[in-house]
Image: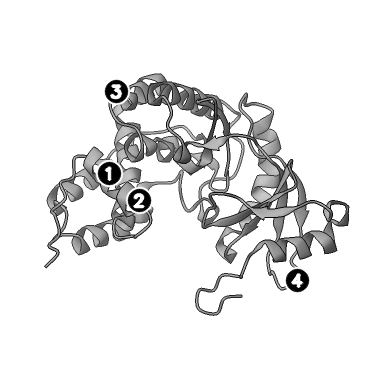
Amino acid sequence: MNPRSGHPHIDAALVRRLIETQFPHWSDLLVRPVDADGWDNRTFRIGDHLSARLPSASGYVPQVRKEATWLPVLAGELTLPIPEVVAIGRPGCGYPFEWTVRRWIEGTPVASVEVDALRLADDLASFLLQLQSVDPVGPAPGAHSAHRGGPLTHYDAETRSAIATLGSVIDGRAALAEWQRAVGAIGTPAPVWFHGDIATGNLLVTDGVLSGVIDFGCAGVGDPACDLAIAWTYFEEPARSVFRDRLGAGADVWARGRGWALWKALITVNDPITGSVAARTLDALGIDQIPRSHD
């Protein structure tokens, strides 16, 4: 465990030890990190057809059993490949959490390749409509989903605080007005399945075509507005309009989707890794940014 961060140290050597002690029939397979990894969970290739996924902190551990339970249900209703859990690992070798072994899904993350945005917008909307059509029996929003799928009001204090903190580098008045519109667009959404983290790193393409969707750790049954944030974090016009039209997104859910995009942008705009995406999102939302002095 890293005493400074509270996160366990996770590397390929640890994964090899876990496999050797818990799944010796896979111990002859090469373990190596993936090219582009996440923060909530760490992923490693196991041979050519498997991968290991290890939560990086205790808050992500409930996702292990959730995905093992519900991914098979969703897979039977979706036409695109999604993760398949083939084994659940135990704590061991100094690693304190449960973890999973999954089948590897071929494809390149959208974040790493140029694609036809109009085609992707249409394909992604079709996938989300299919996901939303699955029988809405599943986990309600909560800590396991980072409260995605729940009301935006959960992040009201954090968002207002971020706006106040960024008041000298963004148009705080416009940002607050945008947030208030999103929070006020409550509507009466019927609970449906949502993915919870529709981002370019979780969308796989093959030959430029959407070929898989990964990382359902934040999934659940609730308000799908959180899955619309990609309209501003990635898509530009006219792909954004194609995405909305294909989804048939009404004014309320679209406004809440803008709120989800705004919240994430505001809390990450100063991050050295994701700040550029956040700045682009604010621009897409029409929130002016004030150039910073380099004196």
Relative placement, left or right, of 280 versus 167 is right
| Crowding near the residue tagged with mark 4, few <14, some 14–19, many ≥20 C-alpha atoms within 10 Å | few
Nearer to the camera, 261 or 249: 261
Q: Is residue 57 visible?
A: yes
Q: Earlier in the sequence, mark 3 or mark 1?
A: 3
Estimate the x, y position of residue 85 in percent, counting from the top left. Answer: 72, 44
Q: Earlier in the sequence, mark 3 or mark 4?
A: 4
Up-down: is 60 above or below 117?
below
Picture residue at 30% right of the left edge, 39% below the top? 258
Question: Disc 4 versus disc 2: distance between alpha carbons?
Answer: 35 Å
Question: Disc 3 versus disc 4: distance between alpha carbons?
Answer: 51 Å
Up-down: is 164 above or below 25?
below
Residue linked to disc 2:
264
Picture residue at 61% right of the left edge, 75% below the top? 1
Relative placement, left or right, of 122 versus 171 is right
Residue linked to disc 3:
238
Residue linked to disc 4:
93
Residue linked to disc 1:
280
Amino acid tagged 2:
Lys
Camera-nearest label, 2 or 1: 1
Q: Is residue 198 visible?
A: no
Q: Secondary structure at mark 1?
A: helix
Q: Are marks 2 and 1 in contact (CB under 8 Å)?
A: no
Q: Earlier in the sequence, mark 2 or mark 3?
A: 3
Estimate the x, y position of residue 172 in percent, counting from the top left. Answer: 15, 53
